[in-house]
């Protein structure tokens, strides 16, 4: 086998989207044969030679996609095509179910007909049940907004003060946590996961589900950005008012906490899964081997270095959270079992073994909306302005947006252990790359 793995012919749905276009370029550079479908062709995003216009919800979608899978001898499908805006999903639920759920059904059916059974699916952290934001006494955590009136110019001090306390950092989401989405977008993605699981159970599909947290860091595809960081970059650059939805969440400063991920790190996770595909099947697809055996097999192979820099409920500083990646990433020893050794333990895998494995992809660190605002603003050397003042620009608060949970923070240990992956780029790198790509 070459170092690309067996899955050298890849089809990407949503190839002209933000993640899809970056994914296609990187996989092509690595030597994979990449093809893609999308409803809209954006020549600035993707090479025309590998693009095929196709609406995955169209009546002929299954037939046309089946033909493409057969024509190019596709080994694996990376299904990214979806509508992803939480606010829009609340306003247009029927459109989101049609595009996300029905489109996924058509992709799976085309794969079944063509005999392509390996799938990477882009899901979301929005599928999880909102975390419990109460303290040990059952009382809701209180927000403690930090005054930035009338102007606050000490960017570093402001960012440090707003770092979440350990009581927040302990509320990470694991892949085994309950799923109960509160947004239409999250509900459509969960339904897709369930349908994919059915195909794995009934047709021996092998699927890796990536639950993305907030992805950013590359070139935006929209003239009007739809993600927080590029929106902030545009607003601050244009000296326009930025709208924050909700200021009374049970968080440190009253605004939502989110876990961010650079698009390059996301792509690295996909490449890692592709290269280790057989190993994942050995571990999880043969006789339904689960987490217990996996943990037993890997316990003596890995050393996890715990971050011991914080005690009690004190906040973690920016430097600790962004710069000391070696304190939180998985360190692999030289005694990892190779696939042949795994076979000796598990026996020869059935070629029809199914696989359904979920992985969180995030940094494992969260930042509030106000903190991200401060971090982006520091790149432009701007002063912070109280929204109540009639200043040249700043931010304004509006009511909470339906479907927004107060906290989304990834527990990424499963991906660290099984994919030997962890995010390498910190929040400042994400912001820097976003600014450079939007310039």
Image (spheres, rainbow, N blue to C red):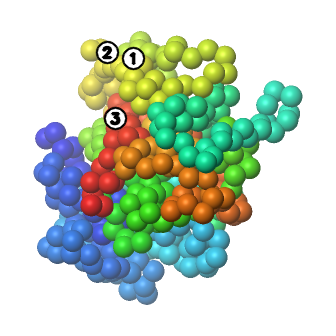
Q: Residue at x 27, y 61 (%)?
A: 439
Asked if residue 246 lies left or right of residue 102, the reply is right
Residue marked by disc 2: 333
**At 52% across and 49% down in the image, what residue appears?**
384
The spot of residue 118 in percent (x, y) is 35, 54
Residue 409 on image: x %, y %: 57, 40
Q: Is mark 1 on a helix, strand or loop?
A: strand
Looking at the image, how many numbered discs can be counted on the residues? 3
Mark 2 or mark 3, earlier in chain: 2
User: Disc 2 and disc 3: Cα gap in Å?
Assistant: 19 Å
Location of residue 367 with respect to 319 vertically, above or below? below
- Neighbor class of circle 3 (other Cα within 10 Å; few <14, some 14-19, many 20+) is some
Measuring from the top left, give residue 95's x and y in whole percent: 56, 79
Secondary element type, mark 2: loop
Compared across the picture, whether 222 is left or right of 252 comes to left
Local crowd size for mark 1, using a 10 Å CA cut-off: few (<14), some (14–19), many (≥20): some
Real-space Cα distance between discs 1 and 2? 6 Å
Residue linked to disc 3: 424
Q: Residue 302 carries which label?
A: 1
Helix, strand or loop status at disc 3 = loop
Tell me the CA gap for discs 1 and 3.
19 Å
State left or right for residue 206 relative to residue 385: left
Q: Quadrant of residue 205?
A: bottom left
Please tell me which of labels 1 and 3 falls first in the chain: 1
């Amino acid at each position: 086998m070459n170092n690309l793995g067996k899955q050298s012919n890849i089809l990407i749905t949503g190839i002209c989207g933000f993640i899809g276009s970056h994914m296609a370029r990187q996989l092509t550079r690595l030597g994979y044969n990449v093809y893609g479908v999308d409803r809209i062709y954006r020549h600035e995003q993707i090479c025309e030679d590998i693009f095929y216009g196709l609406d995955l919800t169209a009546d002929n979608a299954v037939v046309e996609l089946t033909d493409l899978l057969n024509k190019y001898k596709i080994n694996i499908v990376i299904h990214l095509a979806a509508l992803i805006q939480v606010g829009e999903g609340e306003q247009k639920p029927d459109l989101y179910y049609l595009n996300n759920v029905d489109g996924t059904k058509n992709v799976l059916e085309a794969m079944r007909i063509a005999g392509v059974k390996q799938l990477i699916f882009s899901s979301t952290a929005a599928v999880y049940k909102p975390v419990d934001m109460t303290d040990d006494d059952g009382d809701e955590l209180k927000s403690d907004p930090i005054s930035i009136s009338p102007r606050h110019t000490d960017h570093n001090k402001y960012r440090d003060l707003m770092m979440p306390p350990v009581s927040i950092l302990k509320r990470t989401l694991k892949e085994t946590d309950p799923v109960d989405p509160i947004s239409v977008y999250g509900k459509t993605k969960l339904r897709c996961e369930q349908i994919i699981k059915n195909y794995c159970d009934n047709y021996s599909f092998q699927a890796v589900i990536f639950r993305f947290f907030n992805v950013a860091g590359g070139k935006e595809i929209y003239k009007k950005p739809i993600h927080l960081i590029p929106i902030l970059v545009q607003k601050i650059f244009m000296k326009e008012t930025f709208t924050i939805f909700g200021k009374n969440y049970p968080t440190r400063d009253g605004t939502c906490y989110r876990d961010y991920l650079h698009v390059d790190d996301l792509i690295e996770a996909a490449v890692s899964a592709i290269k280790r595909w057989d190993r994942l099947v050995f571990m999880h697809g043969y006789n339904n081997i689960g987490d217990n055996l996996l943990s037993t097999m890997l316990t003596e192979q890995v050393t996890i270095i715990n971050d011991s820099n914080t005690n009690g409920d004190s906040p973690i500083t920016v430097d600790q959270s962004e710069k000391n990646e070696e304190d939180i990433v998985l360190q692999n020893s030289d005694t990892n079992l190779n696939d042949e050794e795994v076979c000796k333990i598990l026996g020869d895998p059935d070629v029809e073994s199914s696989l359904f494995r979920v992985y969180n992809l995030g940094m494992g660190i969260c930042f509030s909306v106000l903190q991200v605002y401060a971090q982006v603003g520091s790149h432009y050397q701007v002063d912070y302005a109280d929204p109540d003042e009639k200043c040249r620009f700043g931010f304004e608060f509006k009511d909470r947006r339906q479907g927004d949970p107060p906290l989304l923070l990834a527990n990424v240990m499963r991906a660290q252990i099984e994919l030997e992956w962890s995010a390498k780029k910190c929040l400042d790198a994400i912001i820097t790359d976003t600014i450079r790509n939007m310039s």
